[in-house]
Structure formats: structure tokens, C-alpha cells
Amino acid sequence: MFLKVGIKVLFIVVEIFLGFYSLVVSESLLVKFIFFAVTASLIAFGMLKTINKILPADKLNDLQVDEGDK
């Protein structure tokens, strides 16, 4: 049930985003660049957060800290 609602909400958000994007594309070059920079940074931060959750933490740093204490 929650998955269906989540997909519907995601679809609505994407539709609103694409509608806003089509309005921005018709504006000036500076507005296009700012919109691109903001969306690119949001996507990059989202990908980094997702990758950090999916991939395991590095154990090498923990081993180096433990060896330094000895």
C-alpha cells in the first residue's frame, strides 16, 4: 500500500519538476545555468548519500587508528 502511494507521489513530483523545467528552459541563459547547477548538486548529494548507505564502511582506516594506538 505504501509503495503504491510512494510511486504516485514520486510521479506527481516528477511531473511538477518537468513542468517547472520547461518554463525555465524558455527563460534566459543565466536562469538555465543556475537551475542546472542547483539540480546537478542535488543529484550529486543524493547519489553520495545513497552510495554511503549502500556500500560498507572502510575498515582500513579503523585498522590504521588501532595500530597507531599501540
Image: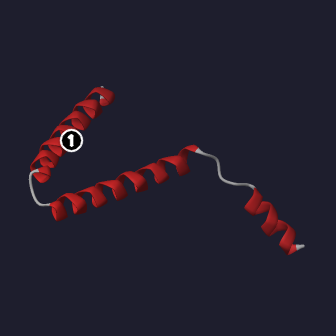
Instruction: Classify 61 as above or below 25.
Output: below
SS type, badge 1: helix
Q: Decide which of 62, 15 is in the foreground and name it.
A: 15
Q: Is residue 16 left or right of residue 70?
A: left
**Colour scheme:** secondary structure
Q: Quadrant of the N terminus?
A: top left
Q: Quadrant of the C terminus?
A: bottom right
Residue 39 appears at what percent x and percent y?
29, 54
Residue 34, quarter of picture: bottom left
Residue 3 appears at what percent x and percent y?
33, 29
The residue to which callout 1 is attached is 13
Residue 35, quarter of picture: bottom left
Q: Decide which of 66, 14 is in the foreground and name it.
A: 14
Residue 32 appears at what percent x and percent y?
19, 57
Q: Decide which of 70, 16 is in the foreground and name it.
A: 16
Neighbour tally class for label 1: few under 14, some 14-19, many 20 plus, Cα within 10 Å: few
Q: In the image, what residue occupies the spot 28% across and 26% down?
A: 4
